[in-house]
């Protein structure tokens, strides 16, 4: 590839700030364990030599933060419009930093895509401000003016997370109370769903599974259907811990009820076997998570729907390209999430608004978080939707005082990585992660 930087026609990046933060996170349960009291995010702030700022947010950990710090060499002095060059420089200089074995969650543990996506989103924010146009317009323009999200339910222990840990704030009411309440059975999941739907107006539901034996979780899906009726689409995600046979057996019990079944089992081959045995569409954020995996995904037909995530697909532009790939091969597209704040949410909104074939409501963990670092506070949902900002760039600005508070929380929380298994072992020392549990 012959990438040139061209004539100097605009601003250059003069400052690159990497600000790790820790956000309060309730004890949500999943197949890997339980969320720690704090989730780590990293905020990036770029400033140009004419004092335009661009921001972004990614899942943080000490390795990603260290690579971000290194990539300062590429970013400082760069033209924020020359994203192809920035990307090529990052991948060629730091490619060796990517390790082949990426632990229990290899799909969202690639470093370079996270680092590049952080820089790309912040550069797009700057580009938008320079041109006086919102990021969505730089991605091809609006396909929709509001972006629909889904209620994302979790089994959980009692607790608010953050400094309250497993305690509940005594003044909490409505969703704020339900967010902190325990949900360890179908009845409590229904209560959680009602409170979340009432607060945010969501029109569809996803339940995170892989926590309890399949019988119990499938019962929750059946109870959700009974409570909300056929007009509320349901999705269910056991995060790959079911065997192929288990996925087929319980998949058949949920046939006709689910809008899609997400990652019942691990790997493209297993998913393809399940797919052939069921009518229900399959979705993934685990078995097809990079462009390199698209050919085998198409050949095997491991899933019908890809859940993109700009943090690990390598930015907003790559995710828009993924939308085109999905359209070409007749796959649906939606979006995956992890615990996050408003900068990630708004970046998702710009991207989703620019993708014509976005066929499903998006996942978001946002209701589970209570803090915010953008001016104006928490992002508002109306009828489950977030309006696409029409201001230049992302259309949001950092609240530096709030950012400092969460940076201080990071310095005090003694967490360097997400490790849900270690957290679970604090509660049950015999608990072990099993990639295939049932
Ligand atoms: O937040 O516990 C969680 C989820 O299980 C998350 O880690 C997953 O990546 O939301 C995700 C998913 O859809 O698989
Ligand atoms: Mg998933």
Image (spheres, rainbow, N blue to C red):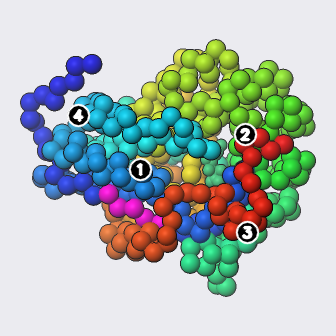
Mark 2 or mark 1: whose residue is earlier in sequence: 1
Foreground: disc 2 or disc 1: 1
Mark 1 or mark 4: whose residue is earlier in sequence: 1
Write the start and end of the magenta stretch as one range.
18-23
- In the rendered image, which residue does mark 3 sit on? 427
What is the spatial separation of the Cα atoms under label 1 and label 3, in whole angstroms?
28 Å
Quarter-of-image position of residue 85: top left
Q: Residue furthest bottom?
A: 170
What is the spatial separation of the Cα atoms under label 2 and label 3, in whole angstroms?
23 Å
Residue 325 percent across, percent down from the top left: 51, 22
Residue 364 percent across, percent down from the top left: 58, 51
| Circles 1 and 4 in contact, beta carbons < 8 Å | no
Q: Secondary structure at mark 2?
A: loop
Q: Is residue 20 magenta?
A: yes
Foreground: disc 2 or disc 3: 3
Q: Is residue 281 magenta?
A: no
Mark carried by residue 240: 2
Q: Main secondary structure of the magenta part?
A: strand
Ligand 1 closer than 8 Å to label 4 CB? no
> In percent of the image, x 18 and y 39: which residue is there?
79
Residue 75 percent across, percent down from the top left: 23, 44
What is the spatial separation of the Cα atoms under label 1 and label 4, in whole angstroms?
22 Å
| Tally of marks | 4
Mark carried by residue 64: 1
294 lies above or below 433: above
């Amino acid at each position: 590839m012959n990438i040139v930087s061209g004539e100097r026609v605009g601003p250059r990046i003069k400052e690159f700030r990497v600000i790790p933060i820790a956000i309060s996170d309730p004890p949500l349960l999943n197949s890997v364990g339980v969320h720690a009291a704090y989730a780590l995010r990293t905020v990036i702030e770029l400033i140009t030599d004419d004092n335009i700022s661009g921001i972004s947010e990614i899942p943080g950990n000490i390795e990603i933060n260290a690579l971000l710090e290194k990539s300062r060499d590429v970013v400082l002095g760069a033209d924020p419009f020359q994203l192809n060059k920035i990307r090529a420089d990052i991948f060629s200089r730091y490619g060796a930093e990517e390790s082949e074995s990426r632990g229990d969650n290899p799909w969202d543990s690639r470093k370079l895509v996270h680092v590049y996506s952080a820089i790309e989103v912040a550069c797009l924010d700057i580009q938008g401000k320079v041109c006086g146009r919102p990021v969505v317009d730089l991605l091809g323009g609006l396909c929709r003016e509001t972006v629909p999200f889904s209620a994302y339910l979790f089994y959980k222990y009692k607790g608010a997370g953050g400094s309250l840990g497993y305690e509940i704030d005594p003044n909490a009411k409505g969703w704020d109370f339900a967010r902190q309440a325990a949900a360890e059975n179908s009845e409590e999941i229904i209560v959680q769903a009602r409170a979340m739907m009432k607060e945010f107006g969501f029109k569809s539901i996803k339940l995170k599974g892989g926590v309890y034996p399949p019988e119990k979780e499938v019962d929750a899906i059946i109870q959700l259907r009974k409570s909300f009726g056929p007009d509320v689409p349901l999705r269910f995600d056991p995060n790959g811990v079911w065997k192929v046979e288990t996925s087929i057996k319980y998949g058949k019990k949920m046939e006709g009820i689910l809008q899609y079944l997400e990652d019942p089992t691990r790997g493209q081959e297993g998913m393809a076997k399940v797919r052939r045995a069921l009518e229900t569409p399959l979705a993934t954020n685990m078995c097809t998570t990079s462009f390199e995996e698209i050919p085998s995904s198409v050949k095997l037909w491991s899933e019908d729907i890809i859940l993109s995530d700009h943090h690990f697909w390598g930015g907003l532009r790559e995710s828009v390209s993924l939308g085109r790939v999905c359209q070409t091969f007749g796959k649906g597209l939606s979006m995956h999430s992890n615990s996050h704040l408003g900068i990630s949410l708004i970046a998702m909104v710009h991207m989703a608004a620019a993708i014509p074939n976005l066929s499903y409501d998006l996942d978001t963990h946002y209701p589970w978080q209570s803090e915010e670092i953008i001016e104006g506070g928490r992002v508002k949902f109306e009828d489950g939707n977030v309006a696409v900002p029409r201001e230049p760039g992302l259309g949001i600005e950092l609240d530096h005082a709030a950012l400092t508070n969460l940076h201080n929380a990071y310095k005090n929380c003694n967490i360097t990585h997400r490790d849900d298994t270690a957290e679970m072992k604090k509660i049950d020392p015999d608990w072990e992660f099993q990639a295939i549990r049932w």
